[in-house]
């Protein structure tokens, strides 16, 4: 679950909890005062009804009393009105079982106050009265309990109010979650771009003027990215400058070596040949360093043109196979689709050659390095597979770093400089392609992906 969804759900739960607590408190606060006021009200009304009934019976007799009791029954808040004598006989009511009110009648006759008996949905109030005929009676009234008005009223429109409240909560939670998680997403994207090699990545301006911890984190990220960019630029500049400075003494060394070979005797010739080989090797390394430095600076001033990637791969494979045969190995092109692309033929050829020669160098004697060119959805993949035992999984990500070597088997005695794969990666990136490596079977599999030109 991503951070946005977590924040959204937590905010929604918090709002829901607050609404629930508010409704509960509203119901609790309303219930007790309403019930208390209701008990006082029915007590006062019962006293009034009892006194009025006594006066009406004295003035109008039984007919007037009966009419008065009927008027009392009409309000919706009163469910039943009974008049029961102290002998247990029911007067002016029909279908009422006096035994149901026996205890209540006894309590009412024993006091001049109103007796209230509260039930689940109703309440009974009872008050004794003495009519003009000298008999004592108990006026019993059944009252409906008051209902608490719902928070949004009882109108059908309350459902629209519920929906409005829910939509407001959802919108508010969404906005708050987006406000908190959006800059974190931008920071994550910037981190990924920086990890991919885009050292110019900055994020503080995209986060905005928030003036909070996230804004401070974005500013710290920019400071870190700026320092990393400065350090790497300094490293690249140092490598480039040293490479340039070494060119002149190496040239002079070559001239001096030729003169020494002419003047030296036969005993010194093996040593001079060794010096010459090391000089050539050093010169080659410097040339590769300059090429790598030029590619790492992001320059795009190399010559571009339309080329046939299939023909290029076929030529590189043929050359590599010729060299591999002398070492007891071979290179085979197992599949090749047509692909025409725009770019620098020299850089692409160098990239494929570097990867292929690296594969030939480490594949086991007697095995073949297989090469295929596969086109799919406008992209072409040059796939190179060797049988050299592969590379430890934790070192795969470092294969394309300059001067990086894997294990003791891949040391300087193998003849490599540690720059070939780094140059290949930069050359492919300059053509907006990608190069990846993974262990496959008993060896290393390298994929070079490039965009093909539309045939149309």
Image (tube, rainbow, N blue to C red):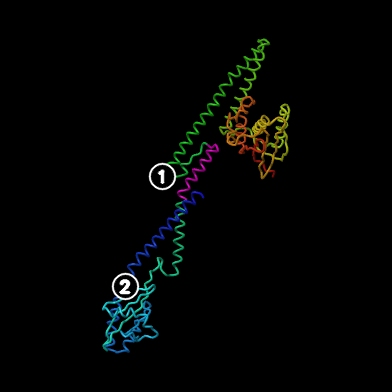
Frontmost of labels 2 and 1 is: 2
Query: Main SS of the magenta segment?
Result: helix
| Residue beneath the point at 50% across and 31% down | 231
Side (left or right) of 64 relative to 16: left
Task: Give the image location of residue 66, x and y in percent.
Answer: 33, 87
Q: Which residue is mark 1?
A: 212
Q: Which residue is mark 2?
A: 39
Asked if disc 2 and disc 1 are in contact, CB closer than 8 Å, the reply is: no
Q: Which residues are magenta?
A: 178-198
Q: Residues within 10 Å of mark 1 (few under 14, many from 20)?
A: few
Of the residues under marks 2 and 1, which one precedes in the sequence?
2
| Residue beneath the point at 46% across and 59% down | 167
Question: Marks 2 and 1, how far apart in space?
Answer: 57 Å
Magenta segment includes 194: yes
Element under label 2? helix
| Residue beneath the point at 46% across and 63% down | 163
Task: Give the image location of residue 201, x and y in percent.
Answer: 51, 39
Side (left or right) of 255 relative to 43: right
In the depicted view, which residue is nearer to us: 31 or 209? 31
In the depicted view, which residue is nearer to us: 15 or 51? 51
- Say the numbered circle drawn on residue 347: none
Element under label 1? loop
């Amino acid at each position: 679950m991503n951070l946005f969804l977590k924040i959204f759900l937590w905010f929604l739960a918090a709002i829901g909890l607050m609404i629930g607590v508010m409704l509960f408190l509203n119901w609790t606060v309303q219930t007790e005062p309403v019930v208390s006021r209701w008990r006082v009200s029915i007590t006062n009304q019962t006293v009034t009804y009892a006194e009025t009934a006594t006066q009406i019976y004295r003035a109008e007799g039984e007919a007037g009393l009966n009419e008065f009791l009927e008027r009392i029954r009409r309000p919706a808040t009163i469910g039943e009105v009974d008049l029961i004598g102290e002998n247990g006989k029911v007067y002016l009511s029909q279908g009422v079982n006096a035994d149901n009110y026996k205890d209540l009648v006894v309590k009412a006759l024993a006091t001049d106050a109103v007796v209230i008996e509260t039930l689940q949905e109703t309440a009974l109030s009872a008050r004794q009265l003495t009519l003009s005929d000298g008999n004592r009676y108990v006026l019993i009234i059944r009252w409906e309990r008051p209902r608490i008005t719902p928070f949004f009223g009882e109108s059908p429109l309350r459902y629209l109010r519920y929906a409005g409240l829910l939509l407001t909560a959802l919108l508010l939670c969404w906005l708050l979650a987006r406000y908190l998680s959006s800059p974190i997403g931008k920071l994550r994207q910037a981190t990924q771009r920086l990890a991919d090699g885009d050292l110019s990545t900055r994020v503080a301006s995209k986060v905005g003027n928030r003036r909070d911890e996230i804004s401070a984190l974005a500013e710290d990220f920019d400071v870190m990215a700026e320092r990393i960019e400065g350090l790497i630029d300094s490293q690249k500049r140092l490598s480039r400058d040293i490479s340039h400075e070494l060119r002149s003494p190496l040239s002079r060394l070559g001239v001096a070596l030729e003169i020494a070979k002419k003047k030296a005797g036969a005993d010194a010739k093996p040593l001079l040949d060794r010096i010459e080989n090391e000089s050539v090797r050093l010169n080659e390394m410097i040339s590769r360093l300059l090429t790598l430095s030029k590619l790492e600076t992001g320059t795009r001033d190399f010559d571009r043109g339309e080329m046939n990637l299939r023909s290029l791969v076929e030529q590189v494979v043929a050359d590599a196979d010729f060299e591999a045969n002398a070492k007891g190995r071979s290179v085979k092109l197992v599949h090749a689709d047509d692909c025409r692309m725009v770019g620098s033929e020299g850089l692409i050829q160098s990239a494929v050659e570097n990867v292929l020669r690296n594969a030939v160098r480490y594949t086991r004697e007697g095995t073949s390095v297989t090469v295929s060119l596969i086109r799919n959805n406008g992209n072409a993949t040059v796939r190179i597979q060797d049988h050299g035992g592969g590379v430890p999984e934790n070192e795969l990500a470092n294969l394309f770093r300059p001067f990086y070597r894997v294990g003791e088997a891949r040391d300087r005695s193998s003849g490599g400089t540690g720059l070939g794969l780094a140059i290949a990666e930069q050359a492919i990136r300059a053509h907006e392609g990608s190069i990846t490596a993974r262990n496959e079977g008993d060896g290393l599999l390298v994929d070079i992906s490039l965009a093909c030109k539309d045939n149309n």
